[in-house]
Image: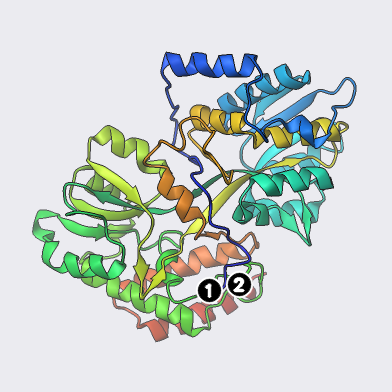
């Protein structure tokens, strides 16, 4: 898979996209230290966003929509302290593109709003994003990794800033895995054959099958790229390729190391409990499970996905982006706020208040992130990830991949038959448009 134009190796870590309902508690001394740093203006070089030359409009006041209300209120407060611009924070999650399209023209919408990257194409076509000015673009590209930048770029123009990310890594039980975690998936496949004890519910590796997100690392193992090498070819999902068929072949082989039917492997609670109770040595998962596994007491670690046939397995990635509304009457103040959202200080608040991972290239000055052993692997993995395509027809992929992976895994279809079924199902779905 050609990813050089889409991926830069990150210098170091990037924080959690979603750990449900969790807040990072910090020692009082660290809280005090942060306040001192803020009050004294002690920010890292390159974190002084006013260097961009943006000056808020006289009388500017902003509305910020975010699903992470505690984080929003924290950054809004700090931004007002720094730049004298009050920020009203409103909790708003799903459907922000549609909401801003309705409220923006009426002057009642947000000036800045968060939106998942897979809604980007809709936002561009709807005309609700403000194109960022050249100085802001230059600063964002200097601070943020290229994988993230690509999720807010259309025809060479930048329409937002990537704020946080999520992807999938390899979780492992330190009590069951001898020595270092596996570097290759072949190691896991070999060890599973002697470790597995289905009668006692012990398995070396477990992974959900009826889920296009969880099986993508396997489907893409031979070079399959969903919707083309840049993920934008909505007319061709890539099902009619040898690379896709080879990915299905690997999914078929998974039954040898997971001797369970795909229906049982569709149960999220079963999979989580197996790992939390120390009955599974490895599983693919994301940052959303870290807190639950910590609370379970299982002795676990996190590392990047292994290779297969000498190629790194590539998971999907998701990015949460911040956009300036095309309808704002304070474009300079709003773009200044966008830049502040990717400052070291804001990245620290993102980690502390929302348990999410920043998209910054360098987090060495972001408090807590560089020292979090569970987060560092996600930073590295993000550099070798595939942002979920934002084409509208991706819904077809979710439906087709879920049932197809189950059929191949359970031996009901050969990989070649699976390839043909995927093509046929895709063509059938197109007729419904």
- Name the side, left or right, on which 258 lies relative to 59: left
Residue 130 is at least partly visible in this image: no
Is the Cβ of the residue at disc 2 closer than 8 Å to that at disc 1? yes
Q: Position of residue 207 (x, y in %)?
A: 32, 59
Residue labelled with disc 1: 1
Decide: is 66 above or below 13.
above
Residue found at the very far front of the displayed protein: 45
- Name the side, left or right, on which 127 lies relative to 184: right
Q: What residue is shown at x 77% (from left), y 47% (from top)? A: 137
Q: Which of 403 and 324 is in front in this view?
A: 324
Counting labels gives 2
Q: Position of residue 150 (x, y in %)?
A: 66, 57
Q: Nearer the viewer, residue 78 or 86?
A: 78
Q: Which image quadrant is residue 163 in?
A: top right
At numbered mark 2, what does the secondary structure look like: helix, strand or loop? Answer: loop
Q: Nearer the viewer, residue 340 or 95?
A: 340
At numbered mark 1, what does the secondary structure look like: helix, strand or loop? Answer: loop
Label at residue 82:
none
Label at residue 229:
2
Q: What residue is shown at x 62% (from left), y 18% (from top)? A: 38
Residue 336 is at least partly visible in this image: yes
Decide: is 134 above or below 53.
below
Q: Position of residue 54 (x, y in %)?
A: 83, 33
**Going from the N terminus, do you reach mark 2 or mark 1 first?**
1
Between the residue at mark 2 and the residue at mark 1, the CA separation in whole angstroms equals 7 Å
Specify few, some or many for label 2: CA neighbours under 10 Å numbering under 14, 14-19, or 20 or more: some
Q: Which image quadrant is residue 259 in?
A: bottom left
Q: What residue is shown at x 54% (from left), y 30% (from top)? A: 348
- Name the side, left or right, on which 73 lies relative to 253: right
Image quarter of the C terminus: bottom right
């Amino acid at each position: 898979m050609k990813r050089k134009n889409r991926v830069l190796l990150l210098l170091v870590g990037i924080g959690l996209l979603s750990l449900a309902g969790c807040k990072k508690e910090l020692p009082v001394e660290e809280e005090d230290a942060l306040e001192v740093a803020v009050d004294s203006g002690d920010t890292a070089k390159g974190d002084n966003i006013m260097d961009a030359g943006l000056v808020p409009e006289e009388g500017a006041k902003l509305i910020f929509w975010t699903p992470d209300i505690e984080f929003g209120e924290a950054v809004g407060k700090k931004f007002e302290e720094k730049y004298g611009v009050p920020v009203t924070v409103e909790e708003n999650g799903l459907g922000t593109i549609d909401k801003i399209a309705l409220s923006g023209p009426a002057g009642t919408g947000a000036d800045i709003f968060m939106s998942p990257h897979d809604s980007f194409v809709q936002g561009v076509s709807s005309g609700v994003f403000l194109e960022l000015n050249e100085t802001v673009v230059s600063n964002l590209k200097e601070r943020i990794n290229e994988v993230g930048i690509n999720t807010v770029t259309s025809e060479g123009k930048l329409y937002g800033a990537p704020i946080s990310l999520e992807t999938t890594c390899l979780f492992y039980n330190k009590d069951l895995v001898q020595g270092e975690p596996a570097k290759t998936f072949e190691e896991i496949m070999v060890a599973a054959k002697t470790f597995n004890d289905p009668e006692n519910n012990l398995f070396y590796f477990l992974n959900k099958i009826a889920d296009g997100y969880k099986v993508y690392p396997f489907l893409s193992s031979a070079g399959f790229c969903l919707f083309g090498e840049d993920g934008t070819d909505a007319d061709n999902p890539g099902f009619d390729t040898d690379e896709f068929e080879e990915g299905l072949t690997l999914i078929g082989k998974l039954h040898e190391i997971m001797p369970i039917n795909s229906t049982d492997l569709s149960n999220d609670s079963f999979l989580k409990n197996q790992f939390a109770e120390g009955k599974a040595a490895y599983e693919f998962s994301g940052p959303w499970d870290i807190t639950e596994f910590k609370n379970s007491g299982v002795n676990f670690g996190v590392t990047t996905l292994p290779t297969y046939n000498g190629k790194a397995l590539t998971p999907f990635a998701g990015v949460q982006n911040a956009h300036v509304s095309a309808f704002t009457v304070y474009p300079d103040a709003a773009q200044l706020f966008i830049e502040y959202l990717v400052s070291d200080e804001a990245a620290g608040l993102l980690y502390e208040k929302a348990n999410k991972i920043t998209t910054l290239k360098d987090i060495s000055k972001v408090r807590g992130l560089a020292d979090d052993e569970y987060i560092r692997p996600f930073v590295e993995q993000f550099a070798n990830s595939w942002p979920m395509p934002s084409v509208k027809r991706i819904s077809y992929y979710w439906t087709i991949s879920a049932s197809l992976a189950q059929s191949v895994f359970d031996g009901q279809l050969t990989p070649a038959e699976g390839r043909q079924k995927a093509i046929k199902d895709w063509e059938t779905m197109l007729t419904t448009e």
